[in-house]
Image (cartoon, helix red, strand yellow):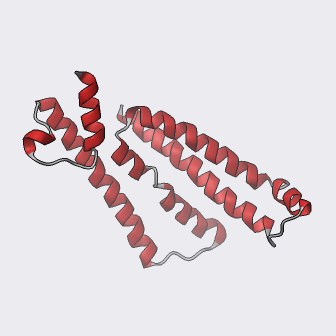
Amino acid sequence: MKRFYVIGFLVLMAFDTLAQISFKQAGDAALPLEFSSAWLVRVFGQPWIYGAFVGYIGAFFTWMSLLKRAPIGPAFAASHLEIITVLALSHYLFKEEIGWPQVVGCLFILAGIVCLALSETEEADEHKDGSGPSATGHSGAGSTSASAAQLTKH
């Protein structure tokens, strides 16, 4: 199951990153912005706009597949890993500067994902032991999804 999550989130991150980088490239080609048929031809004449469509469609289907099995709390947080990959690729491809605020922000994103994943793991262990949020007096980030899963078992 862990392999499914790792591969799934890597694929999701790749599709999301493709979409964002493609939109950046397509947007650069679309300038100057004007509302005319010539502008539409210029935009849709760029291959990058189709990369953006492929990225969004691929991300949608990957996300739907992941949500069938993954707890929503950590899954939603992990779905934002593309922020880090887009930042890194924009530095490499577009020579955009990365400062300490961006580095710290990326670390916070990673820390948040880890915290939510650990919370969900602890909650799953509590449900296996027969003690749940009602027995311990607290609920974690994924308590709604864990409670719903518990209800469907009865």
Taking the spot 56% from the left edge, 41% from the top edge, the residue there is 60
Placement of the C terminus among the 4 image quadrants: top left
Q: Looking at the image, which is closer to me, 147 or 75?
A: 147
Taking the spot 86% from the left edge, 63% from the top edge, the residue there is 39
Taking the spot 85% from the left edge, 54% from the top edge, the residue there is 45
Placement of the N terminus among the 4 image quadrants: top left
Horizontally, residue 97 falls left or right of residue 93, namely left
* Residue 126 % position (x, y): 15, 37
Horizontally, residue 16 falls left or right of residue 47, namely left
* Residue 10 % position (x, y): 49, 45
* Residue 78 % position (x, y): 41, 50
Q: Is residue 22 above or below residue 28?
A: above
Q: Is residue 73 above or below residue 125?
A: below
Query: Which quadrant of the structure image shows residue 94?
Result: bottom right
Taking the spot 82% from the left edge, 54% from the top edge, the residue there is 44
Q: Looking at the image, which is closer to me, 70 or 145?
A: 145
Horizontally, residue 112 falls left or right of residue 138, namely right
Query: Which quadrant of the structure image shows residue 69?
Result: top left
Residue occupying the far top of the picture: 154
